[in-house]
Image: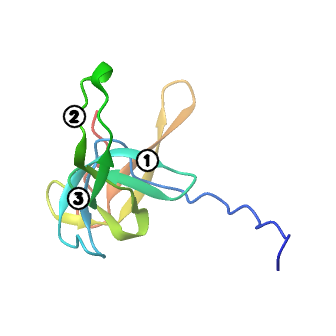
Amino acid sequence: MPGVAKSAEKPVRIQLKKNDTVKVIAGKDKGKEGRVLEIVAEKGRVLVENVNMIKKHVKPNPQRQIKGGIAEQEAAIAVSNLMIVCSKCGPVRIAHSVEQVAGGKTRRTRICRKCGSTLDKK
């Protein structure tokens, strides 16, 4: 209906982090792997290195040393089309383990569902 505002969508909980290696499981770039560059949690999308490349027309800007023309850059891809890659067993789902740390605090770490190895790089 015209004049009715769209209800605000609840942001998707993204379990990926910057610098994770992910594999595309759906879409035009299916099968490609890349590193996570940026996460857009409000839209549920992720920017992955060398995945979902688009062409963008750029105006020349001599002050910033930018040549004009057609530049290629990454576009964000939906997080549902990605799987994190475990170093041992490949693309996997993420599980969480809760550990007790000194001082009565708890720490959640991401682990591989197949082999149980940790996915968090320290």
Three-letter code for the amino acid on which mark 1 is drawn? Ile
Crowding at mark 1 (Cα within 10 Å: few <14, some 14-19, many 20+): some
The front one of 70 and 11 is 70
104 vs 120: above or below: above
The front one of 55 and 10 is 55
What percent of the width, then of the height, locates residue 57? 31, 50
| Front: mark 1 or 3 | 1
What's the CA distance linking mark 1 and mark 3? 17 Å
Any mark on residue 85, and which? 3
Q: Which residue is mark 1?
A: 39
State the residue at coordinates (42%, 63%): 79
What percent of the width, then of the height, locates residue 111? 33, 54
61 vs 23: above or below: above
Secondary structure under the numbered disc 1 in the rendered image: strand
Three-letter code for the amino acid on which mark 2 is drawn? Lys
What's the CA distance linking mark 2 and mark 3? 36 Å
The front one of 85 and 64 is 64
Q: Is 8 displayed left or right of 42 in the figure?
A: right
69 vs 84: above or below: above
What's the CA distance linking mark 2 and mark 1? 28 Å
Considering every residue shown, the one lying at the far top of the view is 63
State the residue at coordinates (26%, 74%): 28
- The quarter of the picture where residue 114 lies is bottom left
What percent of the width, then of the height, locates residue 43? 54, 57
Compare marks 2 and 1 and give the one earlier in the sequence: 1
17 vs 53: above or below: above
Secondary structure under the numbered disc 3 in the rendered image: strand
Q: Quadrant of the N terminus?
A: bottom right
Considering every residue shown, the one lying at the far left of the view is 88
